[in-house]
Image: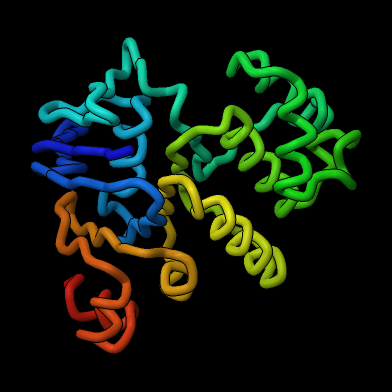
Amino acid sequence: MSIIIQNLTKEYKNQTALENISLEINNNQIIGLLGPNGAGKSTLMKCIVGIISPNEGTIFINNNKVDSINNTTNKIIGYLSEENPLYENLRVDEFLKMCCEIREVGDEKIKEVVSQVKLEAVLNKKIAELSKGYKQRVGIAQAIIHNPEILIFDEPTNGLDPNQIIEMRALMREIGKNKTVIISTHIMQEVEAICDKVILLHHGKVIAFEKVDYFITKYGSLENTFKLLIN
């Protein structure tokens, strides 16, 4: 499994969100996507998923070109957006059943993902009644229900309390043992805790793409890395 990004540029009217980005991400890695607001993190994720099309450049997943119109790669990608849109009038089990139908997988997958993300206690509750933490778990459940090879999480711990953050990090570490995972976050400690490598974005450009240990050895911490390289 590989994600190859070649000369990717995305513009919105007079603003350049991504500028000539080239990267290669290999399998079984957890990649942290770091950068200030407006750096292009969400745009890059949406291009990889195929939600939006770049103005220039291409993305290949397992040698298949990502195309937002006819996306042949979406069966191997799971995506949790920052907004985590859910059908809140549905019960959790109803929502996951709908996800199985959309993803063309059997209902038996529901039991598997419910156990994996620990949703047993709320399976028969309406999503609108759930806490923020449980809603995030439901969002992850829909992202993994078709057993994708690539998972992309945009700010997955945003708004969670400390205990929920610890639980979510443990879940992402477990998921990342045999999948490629890309996580966007503003929390440096989160990246240090769970990621193998870091992509540092600024003004739509890749400032650095290295192992977490590299940044810690060279700059002392990711926080110091951010302060020194983002200016």
- Image quarter of the C terminus: bottom left
Is residue 1 positioned above or below 196 on the image?
Answer: above
Q: Quadrant of residue 159?
A: bottom right
Q: Is residue 86 left or right of residue 14?
A: right
Return the x and y of residue 37 as percentages of the image width and height. 33, 57
Return the x and y of residue 13 as percentages of the image width and height. 18, 30
Q: Give the residue drawn at x 86%, y 44%.
A: 120
Of 135 and 180, nearer the camera is 180
Q: In which quarter of the image is residue 123?
A: top right
- Image quarter of the N terminus: top left
Q: In which quarter of the image is residue 54?
A: top left
Q: Give the residue drawn at x 25%, y 77%.
A: 215
Q: Give the residue drawn at x 14%, y 26%.
A: 55
Return the x and y of residue 83 as percentages of the image width and height. 54, 41
Q: Which colour scheme is used?
A: rainbow
Is residue 62 positioned above or below 171 on the image?
Answer: above
Residue 176 is at least partly visible in this image: yes
Return the x and y of residue 41 as percentages of the image width and height. 32, 49
Q: Give the residue drawn at x 41%, y 54%.
A: 184
Q: Residue furthest top?
A: 70
Q: Which residue lies furthest to the bottom in this view?
A: 220
Of 221 and 52, nearer the camera is 221
Residue 95 is at least partly visible in this image: no
Number of marks present in the image shown: 0
